[in-house]
Image (cartoon, rainbow, N blue to C red):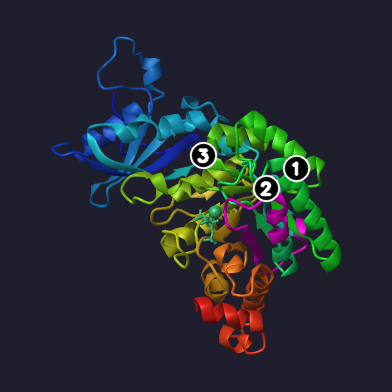
Amino acid sequence: MKFIDPNYKPSKNDLVAEFRLYPAKNISFSKASENITKESSIGTWTSLSTMSDEIKTMRARVFEINEKENVVKIAYPIELFEINNISQVLSSIAGNIFGMKLIDNLRLQDVNLPDKMIKNFKGPQLGIEGIRGLLEIYKRPLLGTIVKPKLGLSSKEHAEVAYKAWKGGLDLVKCDENLTSQKFNPFKKRIKESLKMRKKVEKETGDKKAYMPNITSPVSEMKKRADFVIENGGRYVMIDILTVGWSGFQEMRDYLEGKNIAIHCHRAGHAAFTRNPKHGISMLTIAKLTRLIGGDQLHIGTANLGKMHGEKDEILEIEREIESEKIEEHKQVLEEDWLGMKKTLAVASGGLHPGLIPKLIERMGKNIICQAGGGCHGHPDGTENGAKAMRQALDAAMKNIKLNEYAKNHEELKKALEKWG
Ligand code: CAP
Ligand code: MG
């Protein structure tokens, strides 16, 4: 039974995975390729008395090997998968194989999702167009903040910080990834206080604003928290999709179907397996699965401008993948046809401040959410002026005016540039 078949042409029903493979000492590249293919489809370490010719036809096949670049491409017949069960798909193509002794390192670089699979997932409920319609902002990047300090504020204090950020001109305010429902800031109290403030600032400014409460918790509790947000007029929930897990994320997307609620996806924990270029699962793969399941917004990085690791080119590839209709195959990226599935809006966050906004837009374009926590609440004159400075930096970028020039008659921006450059 051959698992390596260079003449095999993947069918449109195959799921194709591209791996970076680093065999262990004295293990040939083809032996390692063959064994990860076996282990991730129908085989194991030895031949089986229970194997049949019919089952052999379902085996995955290595159809491309580039040893110089440590690349191996594997085609998996769709029959191997429970077509709308993301946990099972990952238990196959991103399961045991990372731990096999005959490899030193392995990275799942990209996955081409077959049409049948894409048709079996909901994708984003609002998508980019829906979010822009919700906020009535169609051209410019959206501006957001994360209430800081990330933990410790009371519900009332949290809501007051949110009010100031919205009042200063930001569109979106979110909870931090580790703020859920602690004694100092219980979830229900925070939701009521913050949505009250959102209503107040919308009335005062005439602008649409949104609050993205973190509902991360066991699934049954997430459903209750989502219901509470909806009952109180909320338009978003935020989920830490990786600590919640794929099954929890998928369950919540199904649960929110038809409720017109946007899902903001935080990726806390991703770097445990995305940042090592030789081992783990790429953020590109995580981002594709997030769009497939139905995240409306996803943190993808700041194109190397902020505090988090993430090379510019990789981040731009990820942004292209979640915001495009179709992707042609090119270096390190497989082709993909999203079949009209709604697009996921890229979120740039982490170490950003007003001085970085023009460069961020230059690199990532306008179809982004630019989020700053410290870069807003760390402003010398407080949150509202920090928000004003972010908005001024955005306005300057949209008018193609240099920040230093614009700062001459925008005091809040001037102070931000003095503090952070
Ligand atoms: C940013 C942030 C976000 C990071 C996550 C934080 O705060 O709230 O969680 O952006 O990283 O807690 O660090 P600052 P990523 O604006 O104060 O840095 O977006 O790369 O997933
Ligand atoms: Mg955070």
Q: Looking at the picture, does residue 13 appear above or below residue 175?
A: above
Q: Pick the residue in front: 375 or 342.
A: 375
Which residue corresponds to mark 1? 229
Disc 1 and disc 2: Cα gap in Å? 8 Å
* Number of on-image labels: 3
User: Which comes sooner in the sequence, label 1 or label 3?
Assistant: 1
Q: SS for tag 3?
A: helix
For residue 258, say whether it is visible: no
Which residue corresponds to mark 3? 243
Which contiguous range is marked in magenta?
Answer: 133-162
- What's the residue type where badge 1 is placed? Val
Q: Do the residues labelled 2 and 3 touch (CB within 8 Å)?
A: no
Residue 219, horizontal then vertical, whole percent? 62, 31
Q: Are marks 1 and 2 in contact (CB under 8 Å)?
A: yes
Q: Looking at the picture, does residue 59 appear above or below residue 301?
A: above
Which residue corresponds to mark 2? 213
Disc 2 and disc 3: Cα gap in Å? 16 Å
Residue 318, horizontal then vertical, whole percent? 50, 55
**Left or right: 404 with respect to 171?**
left
For residue 163, say whether it is visible: yes
Q: Residue furthest top?
A: 49
Q: Residue furthest left?
A: 26
Crowding at label 3, few (<14), some or many (≥20) Cα neighbours within 10 Å? some
Residue 288, horizontal then vertical, whole percent? 52, 46
Residue at the image point whose x is 70% and y is 68% from the top: 139
Pick the quarter of the image with the N terminus: top left
Disc 1 and disc 3: Cα gap in Å? 21 Å
- What's the residue type where badge 3 is placed? Thr
Q: Pick the residue in front: 341 or 163.
A: 163
Residue at the image point whose x is 72% and y is 69% from the top: 169
